[in-house]
Amino acid sequence: MLADTFSGYSTFRSPEFKKALSQIGIELKYQDEFDQTKRAEALNQNQADLYVTTLDQFLKQKPQGKIVGLVDRTVGADAVVLNTKKFPSLKSVQDLEKLKPGQYSISYAADTPSEYLALVLDTKFEAFKLSNFESQSVADASDAWKQLQDPNQNLAVAVLWEPYVTMSRKQGYTVALSSQDAPTAIVDVIVASNRLIESQPKVVSDFLEAYYRRIDRYYREPNLLKEQIAKDGNLTNAEATTVLNGIDFFNSVEAKEVDERSHP
């Protein structure tokens, strides 16, 4: 399975989840692949059976596979963060209008939810215009977070996802806009290759059953998910709670309802 550092994917990295899968005869090998195009190509070239991505990227990449599961909607877990530490006058999205166009940079992971959120917010908020910034595209939100902290960078804005949104807020940066301002924009999905679906449909269904069983348990025992996200992102429990507030996970009932509406 290919994915990235987003906290919403932490279950797929969880040793407990991998152990649960091994008990039903499924070995899950997780790997980060920050390039969305390479994720899809790996599926197409039989180098991966599953990957996690966003709905907009699935439609853009058109992989040789199908959406088999829903992971989450982000409702604040992706965000536009202002470099208040370097530019103290940047305290709200309206302050961006005071910057001279072309003199400051924005950093985000290209072809990811970060870029998509930036494009969506660009159309929704007059004060946030991508054309006013020099774009610095990076591979992953962790890279944008590093750039934001670099005093040698003339970076006014970074678009991040969790756990980096919470880290930035803790260190004194300003979260100006987020996926909460565009709550239907980012939906994360599980994609399986056509090859796997056709040759081993039971493996796909068993994998999904195990995944949603774990998510349903997290709904009943939310502290377990909080602990998992804290461990995955090296966060405190309080920080993990903030991360969780920005992610709306699909449980088994919700995922089934969406699937039934899509395939009446």
Image (cartoon, rainbow, N blue to C red):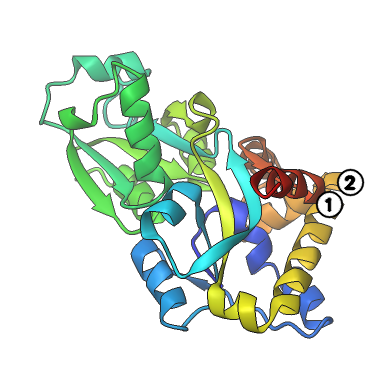
Instruction: Where is residue 262? Give x, y as percent.
Output: 64, 46
Q: Is residue 36 above or below residue 263?
A: below
Residue identifier under label 2:
220
Residue 60 horizontal side relative to residue 218, left or right: left
Q: Are marks 2 and 1 in contact (CB under 8 Å)?
A: yes
- Give the residue at mark 1: 216
Viewer can see residue 233: no
Q: Nearest the camera: 197 or 99?
A: 197
Query: Residue 229 placed where, x, y %?
Result: 67, 53
Q: Quadrant of the N terminus?
A: bottom right
Q: Nearer the viewer, residue 117 or 228?
A: 117
Identified by mark 2, the residue type is: Arg
Q: Residues within 10 Å of mark 2 (few under 14, many from 20)?
A: few
Q: Secondary structure at mark 2?
A: helix
Identified at 75% across, 44% down, the residue is 257
Q: Relative to residue 73, is residue 25 depicted above or below? A: below
* Count of numbered circles in the view: 2
Give the camera-side residue of 228 and 203. Answer: 203
Residue 202 disc label: none
Q: Please identify the quarter of the rendering in which residue 14 is found.
A: bottom right
Residue at the spot x=37%, y=21% of the render? 124
User: Considering the numbered disc 1 on the image, is that residue within a helix, a strand or a loop?
Assistant: helix
Q: Amino acid at mark 1?
A: Asp
> Would residue 243 appear left or right of 39 to someone viewing this image?
right
